[in-house]
Amino acid sequence: MTNAKAPASNNRESIDQDQFLTILSREEALVRFEAALFPRPVPGEQRSLAHALGCALSEDIFAPIDVPPFDRSNVDGFAVRSADLASAGEAAPVRLILNDEVIACGIAPTRPVLSGTATPIATGGPVPRGADAIVMVEHTQPSGSRAIEIRRAASPGQFISYAGSDIARGEALLRAGTVIGSREIGMLAACGIAQISVARRPRVAVISTGDELVQPGHPLRPAAIYDTNGAIVTAAINENGGEAAFLGAIPDDEAALEAAMREALATSDMLVLSGGTSKGAGDVSHRIIGQLGKPGIIAHGVALKPGKPLCLAVCDGKPVIILPGFPTSAMFTFHDMIVPVLRRMAGLPPRPDAKVTARVPVRIASELGRTEFVMVSLVEGTEGLIAYPTGKGSGAITSFAQADGFLKIEALADQMPAGSQTEVTLFTPHVRVPDLVIVGSHCTGLDLVTAPLAHAGLVVRSIAVGSLGGLAAARRGECDFAPIHLFDEKTETYNTPFLGEGLELVPGWRRMQGIVFRKGDKRFEGLTAQEAVRSALSDPACIMVNRNQGAGTRILIDRLLGEARPDGYWNQPRSHNAVAAAVAQHRADWGMTIAPVAHASGLGFIPQAEEHYDFALVTARKRRPAVQAFFEALASEAGRKALEQAGFRPA
């Protein structure tokens, strides 16, 4: 990462500049960062049990008492001397006289059990002096008003929990570094411990930077975006042992940002910033850090993808981190590089990452020289788990919510070939394989049909790869069905000619594809689709927005264009909504989308073709309960009505 700056005014600035221009490997950057921070003491604080959940102990805890604190009965019955029952049997019952007390929980016994006697006792009651066994009440018979008969022997210690059998006085109960959960709280409460010394959660200040940021809940002005990093970084810090304080978004103003950073460092143990714009906010932060304390910048530019602009610094013992602005980049670098340091400062053990092995169905290109992390969605294949790349880019916040985990491509590799077996690190301790897997062309109508399944507790995974990509996945057995809308010019029919062995067609719905434009644009108003395209091609200033290769919509567009490749042809978003947004926001003048999306965006629409949006079903998976539930929802009156209201025509 390089960037031009004013000449260094002193040696310190020159050193910082050199560090900024040096791209470090992930491993080297982490080693330098941790070396500048550790070793360091973990400050402790006293907390009550009620407020210690999730904290790490800062010192060992030894049991102050025995648990249980006395010998106690495990059953309802009678406290006896086992020697009295040595000869007991079905043919030779032993008669014992009952003592004149009944021992219940919380009642200390006052009379010993002498030879030939027994004392009634409840579960949890203290065992009286002289008794060394408990006989269950079910194994006795009354013998007069003050005696019982027992027809089986009792072994010493039978149904007795001895003092200290659970926890012995002086025993190491919990070690420093143990994370306090509900079970640990139970152990401490059993020993009468009400206060414990835990590692104080590091106080972490969070600042977002950028003129374009608006906080959630406020109106979104033109060219602005909502600040997602502030919320997600704050939550991630709290998840990993920190105590985060979000200080808001600071505009790209050096004086304002420096004041906010100085105030944050004065009251916090760590400072995390994110974002900025092309105006050079990162450079501003870099200059400020050099004035906040020694040693300053440790690494600025790390060979990661996503996450190359990451900046790591230490100012007078306090870590200062500048995360990349894109949410996915920010969270990958945070979890990979910052979480280990944060957890160590909080006295917590390293995060236990669960891993699974999965097969990658498609080739994943990678940039040589940078360790690359790729988020994936997991589905069940015929021979184990399959990891589909989400492919949404470093600016997509939904990637984290929709992915199950991520795989890593080493810096020396330029790709991960299709069919590779690889290790996937899960975002949660366990993975739940989806009940229904849909791979192919996406449609807003699909969300309407799958809604009842989600409400019924089924996990539905929909992966948008286009009609052709969906068919390929279905043929490999990687999904339950593939939504497709492919027109065959030879037969002039939709979808059926594209099916192969092991696939069968399930009719879905009809949707109108057409030309979308801004209402009032005279180049398109009142024309047919063919006339509209000719009009657009005749105007060099008219910009189109296309669709991705493999999409059924792309096939329709190419049929209209023929050999023409107008301005905007290579702008290829993957969804109907993205096409409508490009036209509505004046980044393009026309494109092709479906009628419901055009109408929802308030755009003009010229019908071109009513296409068939159907499902290529994998016959071998036809009887799966989730597949049957989907097709029941599709055929239901409620499902058909929802589709019609959205502008579709059920088949």
Image: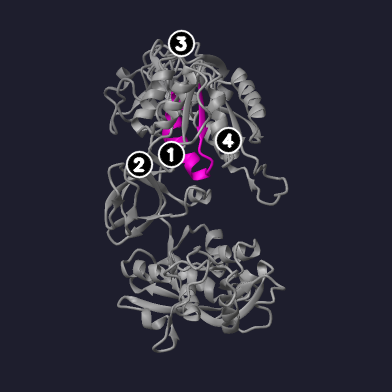
Q: Indicate the amino acid at tag 2.
A: Arg
Sooner in the amino-acid sequence: mark 1 or mark 4: 4
Sooner in the amino-acid sequence: mark 2 or mark 4: 4
Residue 615 visible? yes
Sooner in the amino-acid sequence: mark 2 or mark 3: 3
Q: Indicate the amino acid at tag 4.
A: Ala
Q: Is the magenta stretch mostly helix, strand or loop?
A: helix
Disc 2 vs disc 3: Cβ atoms closer than 8 Å?
no
Q: Which mark, by number, is residue 370?
A: 2
Which residue position is annotated with label 3?
A: 64
Looking at this rendering, what residue extends furthest in the bottom direction? 491
- Give the Cα separation between the discs numbered 1 and 4: 16 Å
Sooner in the amino-acid sequence: mark 2 or mark 1: 1
Q: Position of residue 107 (x, y in %)?
A: 54, 17
Which residue position is annotated with label 4?
A: 281
Give the extent of the magenta segment. Answer: 319-344
Q: Which of marks 2 and 3 is in front?
A: 2
Q: Nearer the viewer, mark 3 or mark 4?
A: 4
Q: What element carries label 4?
A: helix
Asked if the magenta segment contains residue 408, the reply would be no
Disc 2 vs disc 1: Cβ atoms closer than 8 Å?
yes
- Give the Cα separation between the discs numbered 2 and 3: 54 Å
